[in-house]
Amino acid sequence: MKPNKDWLPNQVVNSFDGSLIMQSLCHQLTLNDCQEIAADVSGDGTITGYDVALLLRWRVGIPVPGYTGDWTFGPDSICYGFLTEHQPDQDYCGLVIGDVSFNWPGDGPPKQSAGSAISWPRITAAPGQTFTMPISMETDVPVYSLDMSVAFDATMLRAVDVIPSALPEEAVTAHMTGDGTIRLAMAGAQPMAINDIARIVFEVSRETAAGTPMPLEVTVVLNESHVITRSQAIPAELPLPTEFGLAQNYPNPFNPTTVVNYQIPLTKSQVRTTLKIYNILGQEIAVLVEGVQEPGYYTAVWDGKDRMGTDVASGVYYYRLEAGDYTSTRCMLLLK
Ligand SMILES: [Ca+2]
Ligand SMILES: [Ca+2]
C-alpha cells in the first residue's frame, strides 16, 4: 500500500464522512468496526453528533480537540506515524480518523460533475462598498454533504460574513473565513434540498481601482465524489456617479503617501478638473490633477512632495477639487 502524497487526510476527511456518521446515528446504515474507529474523532469511545460537529469544524480549518485527520494503525504494535513510504510485507490496517467512507487511498480526487452548476448573479461593486453575493447550485445529485471553498484576492476583497442558507433541521454546518479564502461544510442524514448554498458578504478594498476585475473561484464538492467549479471575476465596474464628490483621503494621517478619490457625475462631460494641495497658509504646494475629465470615479495619489519634488514638512494640508462649477476642500495630516 502506498498512499499518493497528493491525496492527504485533508482530502479524504470531509463532510460526507460526517453525513455517514449522521446516517448511522439515525439508524439508516451500520458502520463496520473500522468505520466506528474512524467516526469517533473526539476519541472518547462513543459516536455522537459532537463527532460530526468536530469533523466539520476541522474540515473548514478551525482547530479542534480530538484526532480528526490523524492516522491510526492496527494492531497497536504498528506505529508508522504519518504514512509517507511504501511498507512491504506488513500485515496491518491503517486508517485516517474521520475518513468513515474509506476513500483513502480511494479513487483519486472527485470527478467533475457534468449535470451540476454553480451560479451567482452579475454584481458590480464600488471600491469601499459592501455587497452580498448569493451562491446557488443546481444538481441532480442527492446531496448528503457539501464542501465549498471560495478563493478570492485578499488585496481586493474581504469576507465580512458567511450566511449559510436555511438547511433541514438535522443538518450540521460549519464555516470559516480567512484571507482570500472561505470554507463551508454541510452534512445531513437525509439528502438536502440545496439550491441556495450561502450568501457571502464581501467588502471591496478601497485600494481596488474601478474597472479592475476581482477574481472569484468557487469549488463545491458533493458527497466527496462530485466536484463543481466556477471561476469568474466580479467586475469592479461602477454605475456612473450621479453627483460630484470628494472623499476623505486615506490613510490619514499619512506618511508620506496618501490617496484621494473623487467622482464626476454622468450629467457632466468634458469637465475641466483640477485637484491641488495647499499648505495651511493657502499656498499651492502640488498639483495632482489638471485637465479635462469624463464622468467616472477617479483616484489620485499624493506622495508628500511639492512641485519641486521636495518632501514637505509634517503638518496640516488641504486638498481642493475644482470640477466645472463644483468645488470641495478637505484637510489631511502629514505625520512623520
Ligand atoms: Ca466521540
Ligand atoms: Ca472520506
Image (cartoon, rainbow, N blue to C red):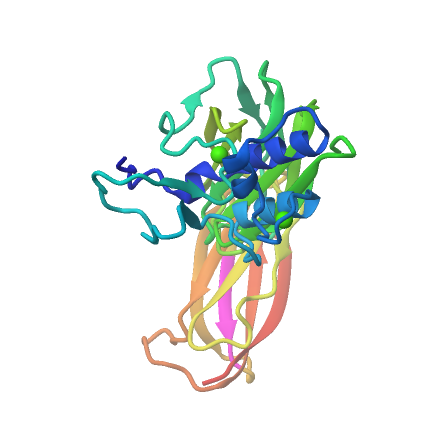
Q: Measured along the vertical axis of the image, is residue 138 above or below residue 298?
A: above
| The residue stretch that appears in magenta | 274-279
Q: For residue 94: magenta?
A: no
Q: Measured along the vertical axis of the image, is residue 86 above or below residue 176?
A: above
Percent position of residue 222, x then y: 54, 27
Res 136 → quadrant: top right
Q: Measured along the vertical axis of the image, is residue 320 above or below residue 132?
A: below
Percent position of residue 289, x then y: 45, 59
Percent position of residue 221, x then y: 51, 30
Res 48 → quadrant: top right
Q: Would residue 192 be found to the left or right of residue 65 on screen?
A: right
Pick the quarter of the image with the N terminus. Answer: top left
Q: Would residue 2 be found to the left or right of residue 292 on screen?
A: left
Percent position of residue 324, x then y: 59, 51
Q: Is residue 131 visible?
A: no
Query: Residue at 23% across / 42% down in the picture?
Result: 87
Seen as rendered, the residue at the extreme right is 169
Task: Report the front residue among 111 and 80.
Answer: 80
Pick the quarter of the image with the C terminus. Answer: bottom left
Query: Residue at 40% across / 51% down in the picture?
Result: 76
The overriding secondary structure of the stretch rendered in magenta is strand
Task: Report the front residue among 277 and 91.
Answer: 91
Query: Residue at 55% across / 31% down in the picture?
Result: 32
